[in-house]
Image (cartoon, rainbow, N blue to C red):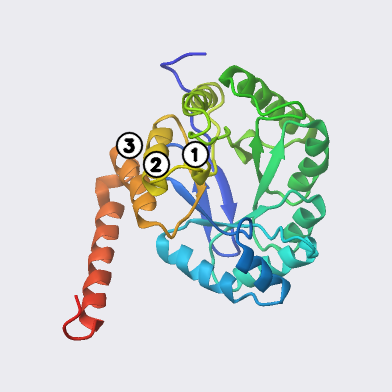
Amino acid sequence: MSETTPATPLHTSIRSASREVVIGSDLPFCVIGERLNPTGRRIFQEQIKAGDLSAIERDVKAQVLGGADVLDVNMGVPLVDEAELLAKVITMVQGMTDLPICIDSSVVEALEAGLSVYQGRALVNSITAEDERLEQVLPLVKKYDAAVVALPNDVDEIPMEAEKRLELVEKIVRVATQEYGIAIEDIVIDPLAMPIGADQATGISTLATMRGIRETWGMNMTCGASNVSFGMPGRHELNGAWLAMAMTAGLSSAIMDARTPSVVAAVRAADLLLGHDEWGMAWISRHREMQRAAEEAAAQAPAGVS
């Protein structure tokens, strides 16, 4: 594996009914908004069980305003028919925004329900290197012409060593491309970003995994950005620093909180510094929009309030 001759970057295309987003390590970073997920949100879960989906509308608007390129939709609520709910919410979200969707579930029936109503070309989240999971999900990916997120762990473990993770990536690529006819550019690898507070070596291992993937295959990568800072103070600062570092190793997207300006700004700044923002036009436009919003907010504030 060469440190100086990375593979040609691959491009992964996903679409809504009217908008295409192309993910690539030589393109602007793809922000996948993570907020449409009930995990760890007790009040949100109770609202959904009561049939109240108003929080979804608020979260969609906030993520679009924050600069999300894609929205991750997960409806894993205990004691709720996940397949029915996921299909309903995907239809609802597609009526609110033209951003493409990442359909996120560990339940195969829910994935198929979501894919069956989705208008466009979805990103499916996710598969692992486990034989059973590959056999269950890859036929759906092929049937619905989707792209898929793949994690290099198997039934035995979540490996800590980059070498083991790369072995599992090789297995995923081989099975997906040779046994199911899925194009390699439609496989997006999650190199397993783990909490830095639990093991300081995990960040180095994940970055080494990213470099190995970039140099061997040129595939796109994503991660759960907030995983890195879990259990630590100053999470926004850690997430922003991690993403900027990971982008230099080939990370091309992340499932992240698009409502957090400092984290989104970190990846947009990295885009500029890595040459993915021609003439800095996106950075300049974003800065002007923020200035304009601040001026409008100040003008609407009551007299004497600053």
- Disc 2 secondary structure class: helix
Q: Amino acid at mark 2?
A: Leu
- Can residue 278 be seen at all in this image of the molecule? yes
Establish if 51 lies above or below 209.
below
- Of label 2 and label 1, which has the lower sequence position? 1
Q: CA distance from mark 2 to mark 3?
A: 20 Å
Q: Secondary structure at mark 3?
A: loop
- Label 1 environment density (alpha carbons within 10 Å; few <14, some 14–19, many ≥20): many
How far apart in space, not on screen, are marks 1 and 3 (Cα)?
Answer: 22 Å
Whether residue 283 sits left or right of residue 28 in the image: it is left
Q: Which residue is mark 1?
A: 228
- Which is nearer the eye, 277 or 261? 261
Asked if labels 1 and 2 touch by Cβ distance under 8 angstroms, the answer is yes
The location of residue 121, given as percent across then percent down, is 64, 54
Q: Which residue is mark 3?
A: 274
Where 185 sits versus 159, above or below? below
Mark 1 or mark 3, which has the lower sequence index? 1
As shown in the figure, which amino acid type bears the numbered disc 1?
Val
Residue matched to label 2: 238
Query: Mark 1 falls on what kind of element?
Result: loop
Q: Position of residue 222 (x, y in %)?
A: 54, 40
